[in-house]
Image (cartoon, rainbow, N blue to C red):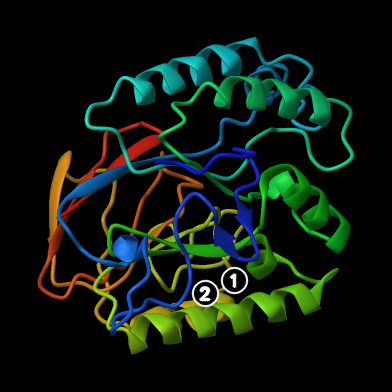
Amino acid sequence: MAATGDAFRRARGRALSAFRHGTPNFGAGRRAGDDEYEWKGPFYFIQGADPQFGLIKAWAVGDTNNGDDEWKEEIKLTEQAVQAVNKLNPKPKFFVLCGDLIHGMPGSQWRKDQERDLKNILKNTDQDIPLVFVSGNHDIGNTPTRETIDNYCKSWGDDYFSFWVGGVFFLVLNSQLYFDSSKCPELKQAQDVWLNEQLAVAEKHKCKHIIVFQHIPLFLREPDEDHDYFNLEKSVRQGIMEKFHKAGDVLRSEETLPRNILIQNIKILVLDMRRILVKTFGFIATEGRSCLLYLKKNSRIVCLHME
């Protein structure tokens, strides 16, 4: 069951309060609640991205900087999404939104109103389905600063954190720090140190599944593709991929694949959702287990069924 309290700020201290967090206790003297560290069978979660209140009008008028003064369509679509999630049985373990929660950039005119309306809808999500938030460029800026990140954290919780659910280790990354950290290099360095620590914990405890959420994909089509606005710069990309490669082999899964995809014997899954309409790819840790990745073409919601 989801933890009580602020549904929008459960990520605190680099952990998610909706689930038990900490170093797994695999020895004697196990604590009550340690069950989230253990694999007990299949489960699934819901992943979405870019509710981006204000985007549809901005694109329609051809002014993505100042044309986001209306978001009725986004309200309708998000309400439908919440209603659909609430009807699921059995219930998903959680509902994650991978960035661009609203369209208004930091400091823009309609930002607070967009955020208020989005929260008013998301608060209707079943209380037993925790909400997990990932920061995107519209949430903290294309070139984030300590101030924009602090403001995001006050509204939505930590910008990067980890949590365990059903024996699976989840990592949430702030991909904007990898895109352009020129105004806050110390924050990128802190995330790098933290990520190394988290992967070391996973390796030490022989974690069978690791799933990473981020907004900007490492690449769209090929690992060595040129850098542009929609992926990470090559050297940064390769550095992150090397960290993940140490966990095992690599698999790319694209939206053009069949709806039900059986993925086996791979190591780490990275779900970014920044451009789900273009590509989805992944790395996953299963060590003999498998997962079903449900992808619906041209959809912004993915169900990942772990088994």
Q: Nearer the viewer, residue 180 or 78?
A: 78
List x then y, in percent, for residue 270: 39, 62
Quarter containing the N terminus: top left
Residue type, numbered disc 2: Arg
Quarter containing the C terminus: bottom left
Q: Secondary structure at mark 1?
A: loop
List x then y, in percent, for residue 53: 66, 25
- The residue singled out by tag 1 in the image is 233
Q: Residue at x 62, y 84 (%)?
A: 193
Q: Residue furthest front?
A: 29
Residue 284 in the image: above or below residue 25: above
Q: Nearer the viewer, residue 241 or 76?
A: 76
- The residue singled out by tag 2 in the image is 237
Q: Are marks 1 and 2 in contact (CB under 8 Å)?
A: yes
Lateral position of residue 128 relative to residue 227, left or right: left
Question: In this view of the protein, can residue 282 be seen by the observer?
Answer: no
